[in-house]
Amino acid sequence: MDLYSITTQKELLGAHGVSLKKHLGQNFLLEKKASAKMLVAADLSLKDTVYEIGPGIGTLTKELAKNSGKVIAIEKDPNMVKILKETTKEFSNIEIIQGNALKQSPPEGKYKVIANLPYYITSPIIRMFLETEHKPECMVLMVQKEVAKRICSKPPHMNLLAASVQFYSDVKTIATVGKGSFWPRPKVDSAIVQIIPKKKLPTVSSDLFFYVMKTGFVQPRKQLLNNFCKGLSLARSDVESWLKQSGIPPTKRAETLSIEDWVSLATSLPKSALTRPSYPQLR
């Protein structure tokens, strides 16, 4: 059964009386080369446990089962689960769970996350696995090309999402996958990203780091001096001194700062700036 074939995909859906749900971002892969690139990026071996989110009809699932020790496939749509059980019945190393991936606990032991993610769940999934105590060894995700571009951005084009992801991990784009490689055909191209959680995080409270960073990004086109004066309990002269202490000109914008810059600012933030009621409790 060739699951990369549009004809096969349509026949499967028809045989089970299933209609695609647009709000779940159900677009099936047609290009085997894309699957191969995901497997290479994940550096799979027969010792690996793979956690797949949104397996759909099982196109990628079968490839993962051939190249790993175990696949745990989480599918939200119960109708897709029925098809998935049929298309993967030849494999004994696939565990299928019907449920919401955002409400599931990570697998025990070492594991890798590999998924073709719909747009609406991309950021929550990445955040969940990077912030959990039991992080995956790596994540290889198919996401919208524009999202991949944002996640992998570097100064002077940094953004809040990129900084949030890169605080916890090293990330890079592996390949671009055109919209013609999916059925139904989406409106935009996709990209494969590799995210590897850092074994050692910066020596600063994550709450403090994100508090400073979000304050700096509150109005991205404004200068840091103005954003911090408005968002912190500090006089203008104190903000200027604090920025200069970290070697950052007050006229700079948030998008020009690196992760190291934000760590420096969070580490050197004057205690008097932490008196605002909105400041989160440190973990």
Image (tube, grey):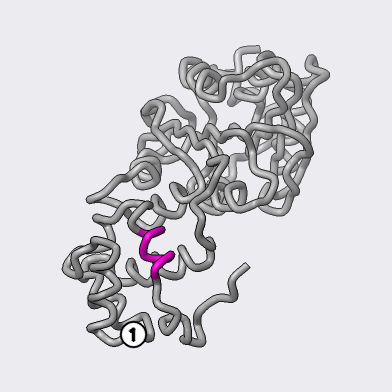
Q: Is residue 151 above or below residue 206?
A: above
Quarter of the rendering containing residue 7:
top right
- In this rendering, does residue 70 appear at all? yes
- Seen at 33% across and 56% down, the residue is 261
Quarter of the rendering containing residue 269:
bottom left
Magenta span contains residue 266: yes
Which of these two is toward me, 72 or 245?
245
Q: Position of residue 190 (x, y in %)?
A: 40, 34
- Seen at 77% across and 25% down, the residue is 94
The three-letter code of the residue at mark 1 reads Leu
Mark 1, residue position = 234
Where the N terminus falls, by quadrant? top right
Q: Position of residue 236 (x, y in %)?
A: 24, 84
Q: Position of residue 175 (x, y in %)?
A: 38, 26
SS state under label 1 = loop
> Which range is magenta?
262-268
